[in-house]
Amino acid sequence: MDVYGLIGNPVGHSLSPPMHEAGYEALGLDAKYVTFEPPADEGAAAVEAADKLGVAGLNVTIPFKRDVLDAVDPDPLAARIGAVNTVDFSGETPRGYNTDAVGAVRALDHHGVELSGTAVVVGAGGAGRAVAFGLADEGMSVRIANRTASKAHALADEVPNATGHGLGDFDALLADADVLVNCTSVGMDEDETPVPKSALTPDLAVLDAVYSPIETRLLREAAAVGATTVDGAWMLLYQGVEAFELWTGEDAPVDPMNEALRSGL
Ligand code: ATR
């Protein structure tokens, strides 16, 4: 049996076990997905221990995404993002990937969104970094807007074709934009939005990385102006789908994984 898992602290609320196990079941794979909660400063040690124990693959979440870089050989995108959320143990040394970036790209792609033109990424934390690099890799120009504008400028210096901004001027940032992604926590468990409704246009595709609630105020207001909306569960799904495919080498059974994820939300 292949053992996969997630390290995080805390991990109790994770929806990854039912999502991945629905995938194993659909493909008839003899595999199990379990959660581990190492102490907050032991992320790299946990990856080394998992390698020794013969674990096949690990997902990595808060607070370990940066620390585990010390224990893996990161692929080029994960190295540029500076964070790893997926480790594959099938080679000589553990290989680190960042499927959060690809997760956002695949979530948009699944909804028929063309990834060309200009994207506005709100937030310059861990999620914002991953999404900005992911969309830039698709060839999009990226405008990064963050409450702390200096962090947006610093990130824009690293991401190709990117500019950094504060949160003050969404009308100008969004007027000719094609894609908007919220990568802040604004809207999580509260009816708030990081972007004023007046700045939203029908030409936008709007992805919210927040998935609790599933329909955030941002998505509700985007739908009301006629924009295409993609909820955060799609991004969560596709980061898992991408990890599943890296580990198993099979096309992931997206529908059963999606059903398992959404029934847990
Ligand atoms: P994550 O890994 O989920 O991205 P993070 O690294 O802590 O989490 O980043 C949180 C992001 O949400 C940041 O961009 C943060 O803005 P600052 O860099 O200015 O702190 C943003 N954020 C959090 N609360 C916010 C709020 N109330 N209004 C606007 N932005 C907020």
Image: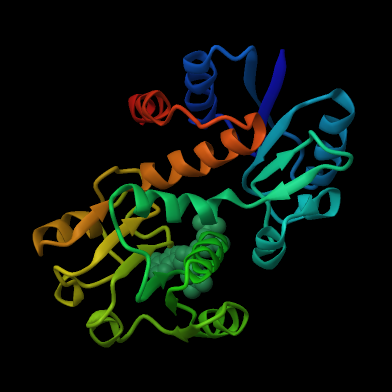
- Decide which of 238, 50 is in the foreground and name it: 238
41 sits left or right of 201 in the view: right
Q: Position of residue 129 (x, y in %)?
A: 55, 66
Q: Is residue 217 visible?
A: no
Q: Residue at x 43, y 62 (%)?
A: 184
Q: Is residue 97 visible?
A: yes
Q: Position of residue 141 (x, y in %)?
A: 43, 79
The figure's colour scheme reads: rainbow
Q: Residue at x 32, y 63 (%)?
A: 114
184 sits left or right of 11 in the view: left
- Decide which of 135, 49 is in the foreground and name it: 135
Q: Position of residue 111 (x, y in %)?
A: 28, 49
- Decide which of 89, 260 is in the foreground and name it: 89
Q: Residue at x 60, y 15 (%)?
A: 29
- Decide which of 219, 178 is in the foreground and name it: 178
30 sits left or right of 95 in the view: left
Q: How many marks?
A: 0
Above or below, 205 relative to 147: above
Tell me the quadrant of the picture where the N terminus can be found.
top right
Q: Position of residue 230 (x, y in %)?
A: 29, 51
Tell me the quadrant of the picture where the C terminus can be found.
top left
Above or below, 199 relative to 111: below
